[in-house]
Amino acid sequence: MEQLARESEGLSISDRRDFLKKGMLAAGAMTATTFAGTAAASKNLPPMEPSWGRQLGAGVVDKPYGQPSAYEKEVVRRTVPWLTAESIASISMTPIQDLKGIITPNGLVFERYHAGVAQIKPEEHRLMIHGLVERPIIFTMEDLMRFPSVSEIKFIECPANGGMEWKGAQMEALQFTHGMLSCCEWTGVPLRVLLEEAGVKPEGKWILAEGADGSHMSRSIPLEKALDDTLVVYAQNGEMLRPEQGYPLRLLNPGWEGNTSIKWLRRLEVGDKPWYHREETSKYTDLMADGRARKFTFVQETNSVITNPCPENPIVKSGLIEIEGMAWSGRGKIKQVDISFDGGVSWVPANLKGLVLDKALTRFSLVTKWDGQPWLLQSRAIDETGYVQPTLGQLREARGTNSIYHKNSIHSWKVEANGGVKNVQIS
Ligand SMILES: Nc1nc2c(c(=O)[nH]1)N[C@H]1C(S)=C(S)[C@@H](COP(=O)(O)O)O[C@H]1N2
Ligand SMILES: [Mo]
């Protein structure tokens, strides 16, 4: 009985002995004994028929809107309590350590608010386009949804992603080192189409986008971007936007700082120069070592991180392992990802898995073996423009450590002999 149970978990007896002998991670070893313990006590394990196969389940529309399994309750957004004084002007992180593929489920998309979530009645929402235009327009949601729609898979990343680590490693979790990141299929109308309706005057060069939330957050966006790939979106992953993501309407500037993707979008004003106020002069400024600041750092540069293993996903069994992770670039498609096991001394190319799309998360993978040897794991992404993800040393040399934004350097995980994974920094 006990033996059968163990085999059903994929652990042969010799495997298990090997596993225990090598003094693996305490948690891992506990899991192995728990399986055996459960096997003796439980009537649910093969070859017995589990209880759920001996009774009837809930019927249709028992839960008219589906929820994840109760056993997945640890897969949630999390915040770092000391980061901000208030939860309404704060940020939560996506549990990227638990995600599969490239799409972030709607309920797990990280949230960033400056004044909490606005609750907007769609029939009372309007989008106004005015300023240097021939025909100022006020659109209802109904008007907007009559335009032919496009659906595109794009990532959104807050430029503060990784920002807590500029001065040193301190977050022992992938969710906190890289979780200000999401990737959804967004549906809406290209901004270009709406601007054509309004007719931008020749002097029009910049657009101010403003939200309808209590912060009325606004950002200036150059017209070239607006005419290129900016979208005005009302849906995400097949359903209407979540309130957290800007229901009923948001701007989406693919590949650019998350803060430019104004949520609860209510106003687009065309002007001849950027608006210098609030956010633009105070926040979202990259302070250099010499006290000067970088200007217009819109693009989220090429970045990548290993998601398996990581602090939340330690190695629990020696043998075959799929080193997996994601890479992304605000400039276009990912071309290549390399993996290092020795802290950047030597590199091996990984495989790109599944869809490789413009300004979207891209999965990479490398199947190898682990037999208890310590690793200094790193991933390095290269995008289609030839941009190579910098080392931490290179980034600090160029920018110092005063900034909290745009930390896209190569990330290091230290895999210890017991399979545990630590967040470390290597220049
Ligand atoms: N109106 C409005 N838009 C906003 C914000 C906000 O507070 N208000 N936060 C911005 C910031 S800083 C980021 S990183 C993204 C986050 O998008 P998300 O909450 O959908 O993940 O929204 C941006 N758009
Ligand atoms: Mo942000």
Image (cartoon, grey):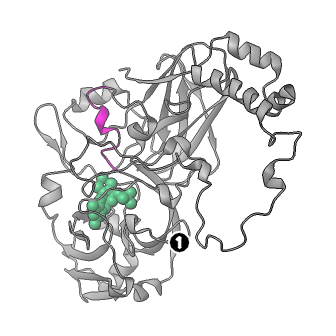
User: Residue at horizontal 55%, vertical 55%?
Assistant: 103
Q: Can you identify the residue that label 1 sits on?
A: 239
- Occupied quadrant, residue 210: bottom left
Pick whichever, 402 or 85, lies toward us: 85
Q: Is there any visible trace of residue 260 in the rendered image? A: no
Q: Is residue 259 above or below residue 345?
A: below
**Is 3 left or right of 106, judged from the image as shown?**
right
For the N terminus, the image quarter is: top right
**Is 83 left or right of 274, judged from the image as shown?**
right
Q: Position of residue 373 (x, y in %)?
A: 59, 12
Q: Is there any visible trace of residue 397 in the rendered image? A: yes
Query: Which three-letter amino acid code belongs to the residue tagged 1?
Result: Glu
Q: Which residues are magenta?
A: 158-168
Q: Main secondary structure of the magenta part?
A: loop
Q: Position of residue 68 (x, y in %)?
A: 59, 57
- Element under label 1? strand
Asked if the beta carbon under badge 1 is closer than 8 A to the nearest atom of ligand 1, the reply is: no
For the C terminus, the image quarter is: top left
Q: Position of residue 11 (x, y in %)?
A: 78, 26
- Does the segment drawn in magenta span residue 155? no
Q: Position of residue 205 (x, y in %)?
A: 22, 69
**Is 372 left or right of 403, judged from the image as shown?**
right
- How many numbered discs? 1
Pick whichever, 58 or 382, lies toward us: 58
